[in-house]
Amino acid sequence: EPEVTQTPSHQVTQMGQEVILRCVPISNHLYFYWYRQILGQKVEFLVSFYNNEISEKSEIFDDQFSVERPDGSNFTLKIRSTKLEDSAMYFCASSPSGGRGNSPLHFGNGTRLTVT
Amino acid sequence: EDQVTQSPEALRLQEGESSSLNCSYTVSGLRGLFWYRQDPGKGPEFLFTLYSAGEEKEKERLKATLTKKESFLHITAPKPEDSATYLCAVEGSGGGADGLTFGKGTHLIIQP
């Protein structure tokens, strides 16, 4: 069964550094998402992306964050000038049609980001 | 603002002991209520989507039901492999840019 793959599985970075989290969505999916889960907290929506542009973003997704689909297969989340509070599990998800109808979001296994 | 509250936070059952998990929600125009399973160190795995009150869906030992205010995930004769965190999420049509709103989950442990 096709799956969403994320790399790396664990990223350690120093405060103030930039990180790029990578995702390969399921190949025929058109909608892409990033969510995060701080340890012990809820899964939180960050951003959705469709047709090469952001379609929705949450208050968390400020100027520190950006997303890009640099080629036909990868979807990236860039976090500039990381802060301690950015430490979390970041999940990429994809969907064939925006998560509505019988096309729910399929999540990857996440990248655990640790900011020291 | 959409809100999802799940209870209990944790539940320990003996193998074969049936029970139910609760998801209470408030949402502006429900587009869908979703149940996911999350294993440690993994991403959420889709289980069910429910759209309207009275709807029910089943998969193996799991059955999800929906009312206008809450959803239940019933687990019948569970096995140890059903141990996981079960997440409930809603998507509303209120115009907010929130994607899916998740609850904190119910951590289910099935003891052999």
Image: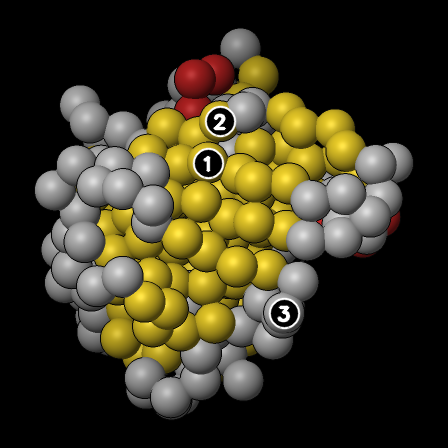
Q: Which of the marked residues, 3 or 2, is nearer the chain's N terminus?
A: 2
The front one of A1 and A57 is A57
Q: Are marks 3 and 2 in contact (CB under 8 Å)?
A: no
Sequence-wise, which precedes: disc 1 or disc 3?
1
Taking the spot 47% from the left edge, 72% from the top edge, the residue there is A57
Chain letter of mark 2 equals: A
Residue under the point 63% across and 25% down: A10
**Is residue B27 shown to the viewer in this render?**
yes
Looking at the picture, tell me which residue is in the foreground, B26 or A67. Answer: A67
Left or right: B37, with A43 as reference point: left
Between marks 3 and 2, how big is the CA–CA gap? 23 Å
Mark seen at residue A7? 2
Which quarter of the picture shows residue A13? top right
Residue shown at 22% from the left, 69% from the top: B51
> How many numbered marks does the figure carry?
3
Residue at far front of view: A70
Q: Label for residue B11?
A: none
Can you tell which mark lies on residue A22?
1
Q: Residue B47: x percent and y percent? A: 29, 42
- Whole-angstrom CA distance, mark 1 to mark 3, is 19 Å
* Left or right relative to A15: residue A64: left
The residue identified by callout 3 is A63
Task: Say yes or no: labels 2 and 1 on the same chain.
Answer: yes
Q: Are marks 1 and 3 on the same chain?
A: yes
Amino acid found under the numbered disc labelled 2? Thr
* Between B69 and A7, the one nearer to me in the picture: A7
B102 left or right of A54 in image? right
Q: Amino acid at mark 1?
A: Arg
> For the residues marked 2 and 1, what is the alpha-carbon distance in whole angstroms?
5 Å
Provide the secondary structure element on which disc 3 rests: loop
Position of the C terminus of chain A by quadrant: top right
